[in-house]
Image: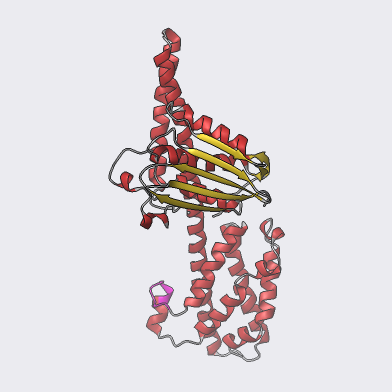
Amino acid sequence: MRLPEFIRQHTDRIVDEWEQFARTITPASEYLDRAALRDHARTILLAAARDMTTTQTAGEQVAKARGEGPEKTPSLDQAGASHGELRHTEGFDLVQMTSEFRHLRACVIRLWVDSLETPDLNCFQDMIRFNEAIDEALAESTAAYAEQVNRSRDIFLAILGHDLRAPLQAVSMSTELLMRKTTLEGDALTCALNIKHGARHMAAMVSDLLELVRSRLGKRLPIEPAPMDLADAARAAIAEACAGNPECDPTLKVEGDTRGIWDAGRLDQLLQNLIGNALQHGSNPREVIVTLKGEADSVLLSVHNYGDPIPEEAVGTIFDPLVRSADEELGQPSTSLGLGLFIVKEVVTAHEGTIEVSSSEAAGTLFSVKLPRQI
């Protein structure tokens, strides 16, 4: 029996062996069900069988071995890429993921050879074509896995760099106020100047970090939910935002029960970014209003400010990473690299909530977040 037909007739048996091998890859496999362990094995096998039956000249075979041939098996490429992405999400490392293809190759050849009674020259050609197909799927899977690794790393670095800016600004502004309102001499003055220069140097390094990942970004943020009160988090976020801006005086309105089970650190990120965004783009830092309203199964959070409205064409992309506002594009000073609202969206998504934005010159700009009390 030719190899493509053998694969079609024994797909279930081969996939069963794939699953048994995948189950030995720990610790990632310990949390996966049968469907997840089997993943794209069937699709990869059937696509490989189809590829083996397509006509291929000697020149095309050489080109394909070099990765230069025409795309003949888009379904194989897609299945391989999807497998790589999912294995990264599920916690497999690159060596573990590629070992699945090694086992698949060995399994198919072993079972097929055992079934042959009188091998002929066609068998060698079938093996060559099968190896080509598996190598193609492996290459796509590895490339997709590597892309997910790079993407996750870049998102982490970008969020880290962005979130370092708020405390650095608070340190810098507090040092400036201390030096203006207090007469410092000797060691005290030296310490204050060192803090000032150190904060400035760290801010420059953070900017360099963000520039590094700016052109390469964005999966769901990891969270550690615990009981907390969103009103307490909002008061703390407002106090921190105002530490570096003496003119800011946001109004906090609280109605109903604002307690729930969320990740306090992530919600602090959300609040800091929404409040900071309103202060930065609002026409008056004293007219920013933060509203919390407890409902039966959720808590509503809104941040409102007046100022130039968000252009209608920009509303659809405002939560995308590294998107800047029109005034920032024109070169006006800003500390934003377009990550704040991206982080907000990621935090909301991680908590299975929703976020909406509306903006007009008359009504102002309103960000509305709905968070389930428990996820």
Looking at the magenta stretch, what is its main secondary structure?
A: loop
**Span colored in magenta:** 64-71
User: Is any part of residue 278 visible from this angle?
Assistant: yes
Q: Is residue 287 above or below residue 13?
A: above
User: Is any part of residue 160 visible from this angle?
Assistant: no
Q: Position of residue 253 (x, y in %)?
A: 56, 37
Q: Position of residue 101 (x, y in %)?
A: 58, 69
Q: Nearer the viewer, residue 322 or 278?
A: 278
Asked which quadrant contains residue 178, the reply is top left
Q: Nearer the viewer, residue 322 or 147?
A: 322
At 67% across and 70% down in the image, what residue appears?
Answer: 35
Asked which quadrant contains residue 169, the reply is top left
At 62% across and 41% down in the image, what residue appears?
Answer: 255
Q: Exactly how many numbered labels are in the figure?
A: 0
Quadrant of the frame with the N terminus: bottom right
Q: Position of residue 175 (x, y in %)?
A: 44, 21
Q: Nearer the viewer, residue 29 or 298?
A: 298
At 56% across and 58% down in the image, what residue appears?
Answer: 94
**Is 106 left or right of 215, judged from the image as shown?**
right
375 within the magenta span: no
Asked which quadrant contains residue 283, the reply is top left
Q: Nearer the viewer, residue 305 or 222?
A: 305
**Is 296 left or right of 278, judged from the image as shown?**
right
67 within the magenta span: yes
Q: Is residue 67 above or below residue 195?
A: below
